[in-house]
Image (cartoon, rainbow, N blue to C red):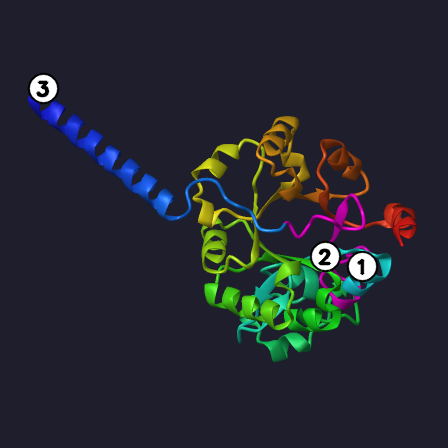
């Protein structure tokens, strides 16, 4: 019995050693562990802190509507966050929820509606039917061009749609102004590897997940790392500084009650929920 146990033990050691060697080989083939980052598109902006308008100005207009982004532009925002989804007929739209009841007042899934059906629906805003419609991503790019940095939060995992968004970004020559964001590490890695010219952000990179950074091969490492502000602490900030990643850190879940906390931590890229308490701040920027 001892002989059999010994053989099993040696076999397991051999398998583990082989897996480690394959992993090391994979790392070396894909650029090692250290990534040589390209130009940081969030650097050198007019303001020390770069504010992204979260789904536009969603306290004044329906979130992700063209009106909400127009207000962000009028207030002087240099960046916006928006959500990417698709209709049943594969039209790329700006919409957050998988379900449509909260935003459109109908019981359906956004992916179950075709673009013609969706065009008949208006956003519900402050419990009333508004005049705002769900917009296509290309409408947004066509109107604003390179006036914004666009943080695209993908609510889908369809890689063919991802490629279509890449084509759109290139069509409007805004790849230097766009970040593709998702909590799906495999999706982000695939984009990073296949389209190195596209900026990527891995969402959900919370305090305590720093070890994960070291496991990612250089060619698959995202350009930016994001999470809720509440999931970021001093030890995480210290680690970011040591890795020279603090200027590539983005936080969301930020509003007028806590944005100064983010600034005190040294985080300069904030996705904020705009409210009237910011009005004077943005007036001073213009």
* Callout 2 touching callout 1 (CB < 8 Å): yes
Q: Nearer the viewer, residue 132 or 84?
A: 84
Q: Quadrant of the C terminus?
A: bottom right
- Magenta region: 40-67
Badge 1, how many Cα within 10 Å: few under 14, some, many 20+? many
Outermost residue on the top side: it is 2
Secondary element type, mark 2: strand
Secondary element type, mark 3: helix
Q: Is residue 47 left or right of residue 201?
A: right
Q: Residue at x 46, y 49 (%)?
A: 220
Kindly identify which residue carries mark 1.
72
Q: CA gap, disc 3 to disc 2?
A: 65 Å
- Which mark's residue is nearer the viewer, 1 or 3? 1
Where residue 196 sits in the image (x, y, percent)?
51, 57
Q: Nearer the viewer, residue 176 or 252?
A: 176
Where residue 283 sits in the image (x, y, percent)?
91, 52
Where residue 174 sits in the image (x, y, percent)?
65, 65
Q: Quadrant of the N terminus?
A: top left
Kindly identify which residue carries mark 2.
80
Within the image, what quadrant is residue 63 found in? Answer: bottom right
For the stretch drawn in magenta, what is the main secondary structure?
loop
* Callout 1 touching callout 3 (CB < 8 Å): no
Magenta span includes 44: yes
Kindly identify which residue carries mark 3.
2
């Amino acid at each position: 019995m001892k002989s059999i146990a010994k053989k099993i033990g040696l076999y397991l050691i051999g398998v583990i050693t082989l897996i480690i060697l394959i992993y090391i080989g994979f790392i070396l083939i894909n650029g090692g562990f250290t990534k040589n980052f390209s130009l940081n598109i969030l650097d050198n902006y007019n303001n020390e802190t770069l504010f992204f308008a979260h789904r536009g100005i969603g306290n004044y207009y329906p979130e992700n509507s063209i009106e909400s982004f127009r207000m962000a532009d009028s207030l002087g925002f240099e960046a916006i966050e928006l959500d990417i989804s698709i209709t049943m007929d594969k039209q790329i739209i700006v919409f957050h929820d998988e379900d449509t009841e909260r935003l459109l007042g109908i019981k359906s899934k956004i992916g179950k509606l075709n673009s013609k059906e969706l065009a008949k629906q208006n956003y519900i805003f402050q419990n009333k039917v508004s005049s705002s419609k769900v917009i296509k991503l290309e409408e947004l790019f066509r109107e604003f061009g390179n006036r914004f940095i666009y943080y695209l939060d993908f609510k889908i995992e369809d890689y063919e749609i991802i490629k279509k968004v890449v084509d759109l970004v290139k069509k409007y020559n805004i790849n230097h102004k766009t970040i593709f964001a998702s909590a799906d590490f495999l999706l982000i890695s695939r984009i990073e590897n296949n389209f190195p010219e596209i900026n990527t952000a891995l969402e959900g990179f919370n305090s305590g997940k720093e070890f994960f950074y070291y496991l990612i091969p250089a060619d698959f490492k995202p350009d930016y790392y994001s999470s809720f502000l509440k999931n970021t602490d001093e030890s995480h900030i210290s680690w970011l500084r040591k890795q020279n990643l603090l200027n590539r850190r983005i936080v969301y879940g930020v509003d007028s009650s806590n944005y100064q906390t983010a600034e005190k931590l040294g985080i300069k890229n904030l996705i904020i929920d705009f409210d009237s308490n910011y009005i004077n701040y943005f007036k001073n920027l213009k």
